[in-house]
Image (tube, rainbow, N blue to C red):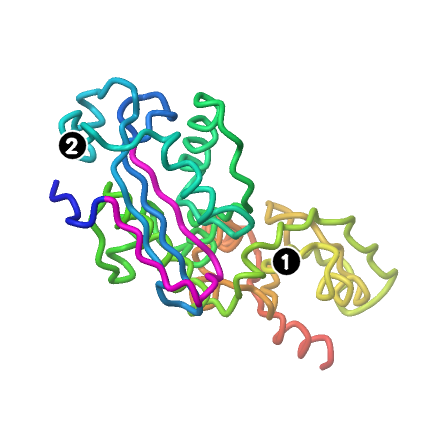
Amino acid sequence: MKLSPHDPLDLMDATEEPDFVVVDVETACARVSSICQIGIVGFRQGREVFAYETLVDPCDEFSTFNIRIHGISPEHVAGKPCFGDIHSVVAGHLTGRITVAHSGFDKGALAAACRIGELAAIETTWLDSVRVAKRAWPQLSSHRLNVLSRHLGIRHRHHDALSDARAAGMVIVRAIEETGIDLEGWMAKPGKAGKAPAAATDGPLKGQRIAILGEPRNGTLAQFLAGAGARIVSGVGTTTTILAISARQSYGRWVTADAQYRKAEELRGAGVPVEIVTEADLRARIAG
């Protein structure tokens, strides 16, 4: 592993408050508190505005397994700060901001390091870039950071904390660009689907059992279809007659990779007469 000549690295444009920051850590052994490298990158309006990186003495053992993954050994961290020494710097970059991490590992590692060191917990709002990537690019068989980087053409050195943080940040930037969902939209918690509306006693869709892809079963499309006599079901099954694709679905051209779409296709292949219809076509059918 070629370590950065900037060790530690702390480059920041103090005039630009980031929209979000990204953090990544490497650990010395199986204990998640054993942070041996940390990288933090700030992004504003789709571009990097600051970067922080340092090696860390984990005050713990190094396992050969972890050394093989990231290339950091006890010799690299000799004389480097321990986590307690950089806690205030890390907290200063993360506290009160949206913090992105690729999976929950880094969040857990920071919490464990604070707990072991009897340090104040870092108060930040977390966003998992894995969850974002799965929704933005559902067609990919894996949403590991190295796979995403290849798919998106992002320069990336896997298991280097600063490079991983930069790559995860670009995943968010590209997801915003490609889906049209802004940062606030990605931060929104998925609402629990309410009760489906009751089907009208009569109408052009009477007898149809419709699953909806792209919005809740109590949303505006569900209300419209139920008003036309359809029974709204929670998901695609053997008794489903129509999979309705909402005009508000966020998958774009990759909607065919959605689990409900794939399930409908599998049932069709097995002889179950499930129609896959867009919202526009359904509305036109009812109007006709």
Label number found at residue 76: 2
Q: Position of residue 12 (x, y in %)?
A: 35, 59
Left or right side of 22 for 271: right
Work out whether residue 85 or residue 253 is closer to the camera in this orientation and state it.
85
Question: From the viewer's perspective, is residue 117 above or below residue 247?
Answer: above
Q: Does the magenta stretch include residue 158?
A: no
Q: Can residue 138 be seen in this view?
A: yes
Left or right side of 36 for 198: right
Which quarter of the rendered picture does the C terminus lie within? bottom right
Provide the residue designation for mark 1: 212
Q: At 37% from the left edge and 26% from the top edge, which residue is drawn? A: 32
**Do the CB atoms of the residues marked 2 and 1 lie less than 8 Å apart?**
no
Left or right side of 4 for 30: right
Type of amino acid under label 2: His
Question: From the viewer's perspective, is residue 282 above or below residue 161?
Answer: below
Q: At 59% from the left edge and 60% from the top edge, which residue is drawn? A: 214
Q: Position of residue 239 (x, y in %)?
A: 64, 47
Q: Give the range drawn in magenta.
A: 8-26
Indicate the secondary structure of the residue bearing disc 2: helix
Q: Position of residue 274 (x, y in %)?
A: 57, 56
Of labels 2 and 1, earlier in sequence is 2
- Give the Cα separation between the discs numbered 2 and 1: 54 Å
Q: Answer with the quarter of the image where residue 149 lies.
A: bottom left
Label number found at residue 151: none
Work out whether residue 23 or residue 15 is closer to the camera in this orientation and state it.
15
Type of amino acid under label 1: Ile
Q: Answer with the quarter of the image where residue 85 lies.
A: top left
